[in-house]
Image (cartoon, helix red, strand yellow):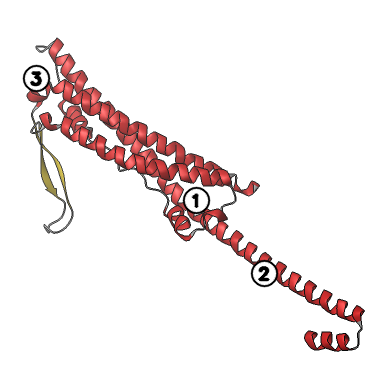
Amino acid sequence: MILRSVTKHVKDQNWFAVFLDFFIVVVGVFIGLQVANWNEARQNLDKEQFYIERLKEELTVTIERLEGASQLYLKSINAIQLLLDARNAYQLNPDTYQADEDDLIIAFVDITRGRVPASSPAVFEEMVANGELVLIRNSKLRQALYEFDEFSKVSIYGWKTLRDQLLNAMQPTTGILIYKAKTTAASYSQARYVEPDTFDLTRLLTQPNLSGALSTAMAAQENQLTFARRQLKLAKAIQAQIESQNDY
């Protein structure tokens, strides 16, 4: 209809009407583009909010996991120190030393406590894969996510290395504590777990060079604790940026 109107006005040499027709077309196109842009912007805001809510949920789990990991590594370090103190106390006064065997068994079990590092949030990986990380308008939040992702890769490599160091250090302790399977149900196929069976207290207290092995294990666990706490700090930095998201 507009084209027919323009053609008629050109034939009639009604240039004002021609200009008016073109003006109407331009305004119509402009309004159409603005509406399309507004719809796209609205959709992007909805997607951003969707991603933010998923990040909140994932971070809650991640932070709990990392806090738990920090506690486990600290528990391991304290357990190793208890064993070292027991050896030192025995060596100073072997005739009068009285061991709390139950505490030493618990400490021995706790030596290898730990947890695999947290990976990057799945929603972050999804945003990167879809090219939609740019939908997060908060540049500090994006940076915090990148930093956590990078450190997560370092953490898993560090965890494997330190875990190997711990297990190698623990080789001299083989046989000090013997486990047995404890059946918790009548059927063999149902849940089972292990529990301490026999404990060689004499070996723990007198075996040469065992203090060095335990100290190496403690160093490995202390480094694991450092990794876990650093990752926890980065996760909380993401959480802090999410909580400030309403300012954007």
Taking the spot 83% from the left edge, 74% from the top edge, the residue there is: 23
What secondary structure is found at the residue carrying circle 3? Answer: helix
Asked whether the viewer can see residue 63, the reply is no
Q: Quadrant of residue 171?
A: top left
Q: Give amino acid for label 3.
A: Thr
Mark 1 to mark 3: distance in Å? Answer: 52 Å
Q: Which residue is mark 3?
A: 206
- In percent of width and height, residue 236 lies at 48, 40
Q: Nearer the viewer, residue 196 or 56?
A: 56
Which one is closest to the eye, mark 1 or mark 3?
1
* Residue that mark 2 sits on: 36
In this image, 176 relative to 191: left or right? left
* Residue 215 vertical position relative to residue 232 in the rendered view, above or below: above
Choose top left, top right, bottom left or bottom right for residue 22: bottom right
Gap between marks 2 and 1 measured at Cα: 30 Å
Residue 117, percent across and down?
34, 42
